[in-house]
Amino acid sequence: MSDTPSDASPRPRQPFARGLPLAAPLRLNRPSDTWFKPALSVVAASAVPHLTLLALGRLDLVMYTMAGSLCALYGHGLPYARRARTLVGVVLSMAAGLAAALVTASLTHSTAVLVAVGALLAAAQKVACDAVRIGPPGPVILTFVSSAALFAPQRLGQVPAHLALTLGAGAVAWLVCVGPALIRREGPERRAVARALEAAADHVAEPGPRTRHTAAAAVHAAWQCLLASGRPTPVRRSLERLVVHAEAAGASAQPDQDPDRLRAWAALTRARGPVPEPPPAPGTAAELYGIDAERAAVYGIDAERAALRGSGGRRAARRTLLRSLGPGSHLLPVAARTLIGCALAGYLCAALGVGRPYWAIVTAASLYQANTTLTWNRTLQRTLGNLLGVLVFAAVLPLSRTGPLALVLCCLFFSFAAEALITRNYWLGSVAVTPMALLVLEFGGTHPAGELVGDRVLDTVLGALAGFLAAALVTNRRAAGRVERALEAAAQARTDAERAYADRAHTGPDGLDRARRALTARLVELREAADIAAGEWWQRALPEQRLLAAERAGHRTLAATAQRQGPSVRAPETRRGAVAPAPANGAA
């Protein structure tokens, strides 16, 4: 008997506004395994221009060099080939936002116009960063720089020189972030594969929907990292074989699989020594046909790399980007929230006579996450972190005023501390970000401490209130529609994978593996869309049963097609050569 609810059964009611947590958003997490990379990179990228300006006696120009130096925070999870291109885009985007802000500041002193331009820039930066999935720290750094520049005294003739400083510091940041490729070329790939092995080991040790999804997402991220890594090398070949093992373990979690072995491989992969050489994964060509066929175990990843680099791959990427920015995009409600919230925060602070409304704009812009619940979490974190941060600033201000070098060293220290702490929890990182942002004002001249602290507290509270109010009132009903599209895409990807398995004699292992990777990606996107919609307000009920059935069916197909090659390898069948379909209701 099917447990699928009939049309006559009552439909679950979706609450309009969900309960908002208070303690959970403030709990500390384990630090990121690479927290020190952005922390050290931003210090190195900032130290060079800071100390140069100190030697020249022009610390008043630090704001412009800092704009380029902060680009060193991006791209640390990407392979170096992709990172190099991404950082160029980040530096150019930073310069473009700064140019718009500086030109506006030189042409008008109207607070109303400056706040409007700041809100427009914040919304555009939010949409662009979400569309390209730039990753942390996201648009908040771009918004911080452009909003601050709007309210800095500026003449039109100074703009080119100030932009040159930003581009020069951005070039230093690029060298700092890409330079390690000369020492450890496959470092990002090794870390991504190690995460996939660890996630697969967790799933084998404790099978369940949560660990299964985590393993699938980690394996998908590892494949994407390897696909973007450039030409194949012996180390990348070994990493590809390790991902195959992680994929097989994450898909099936059979009792004969050893989580300790996967964790041992992960530790060796993450270390600086040789990459472990695993035995051929079950069902691969190396196991079935001997070592001469081992190259087939790569499953067409070389062809997929070539396709991504070719004109067809670039056109597909452009189409995907344009769809994410089009009229039906799920990003538009978030853009509307950002625009309205930032404008409301800026005008509210200006009406109350606060001299730096850009702090309120940045506070509001930093709140907007994928849904209302996550935005509430960030509101709590940002408010607590900023309020504690102003106390730290008040304590360290006398030290920073002992000399220019002390001011530079304090800024570098808080830059490092922010990145070292922010992966534990956003509020903890904000405790360090706030004094750093306040100390930047000291480069242009001293200000009364009480005025700075009071303005920052008021801007934080008003920006947080206005930002969350906009998030609560601007509806995002497209979140549920995105779930429907993700369900359809997952069903189509599952059908393609089953068809490729049934006809694997003609499609070959490379075609089957591409279909499996596509199915994994669709399942990851489905879970992401469902999680986003689950935390959104003012929308219709989610199809929970369909989501559960689609995820179960997709993961069963991944497990059934894990035996990729060879006529003697069979998955459970209902007819000759066909993968056994999962029940429509997801029951085993």
Image (cartoon, grey):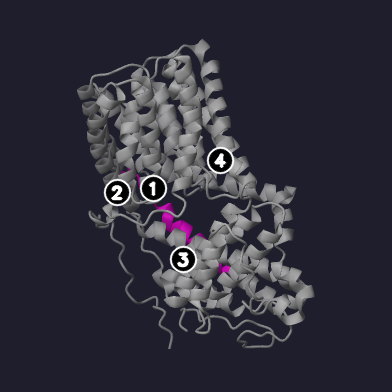
Residue 536: x and y in percent read 35, 54
**Magenta highlight range:** 470-492
The residue labelled by disc 1 is 369
For marks 1 and 3, give the one nearer the viewer: 3
Residue 477 falls inside the magenta stretch: yes
Work out how far the residue at label 4 is from the one at label 1, CA to CA, in angstroms: 27 Å
Number of the label disc, if any, that sits on residue 376: 2
State yes or no: discs 3 and 4 in contact (Cβ < 8 Å): no
What secondary structure prevails in the magenta region? Answer: helix
Q: Is residue 138 visible?
A: no
Q: Is residue 197 visible?
A: yes
Q: Quadrant of the N terminus?
A: bottom left
Viewer-proximal residue, 245 or 513? 245
* Label 1: which secondary element: loop
Amino acid on which the number 3 mark rests in the picture = Thr
Number of the label disc, if any, that sits on residue 214: 3
The residue labelled by disc 4 is 177
* Label 3: which secondary element: helix
Residue plotted at (74% across, 54% down):
306
- Is tag 3's residue or tag 4's residue first in the polypeptide sequence? 4
Packing grade of label 1 (10 A; few <14, some 14-19, many >=20) is many
* Label 2: which secondary element: helix
Packing grade of label 2 (10 A; few <14, some 14-19, many >=20) is many
Residue 89: x and y in percent read 58, 37
Work out how far the residue at label 3 is from the one at label 2, CA to CA, in angstroms: 24 Å
Amino acid on which the number 2 mark rests in the picture = Trp
- Is tag 4's residue or tag 1's residue first in the polypeptide sequence? 4
* Quarter residue 533 falls in: bottom left
* Quarter residue 117 falls in: top left
Residue 250 falls inside the magenta stretch: no
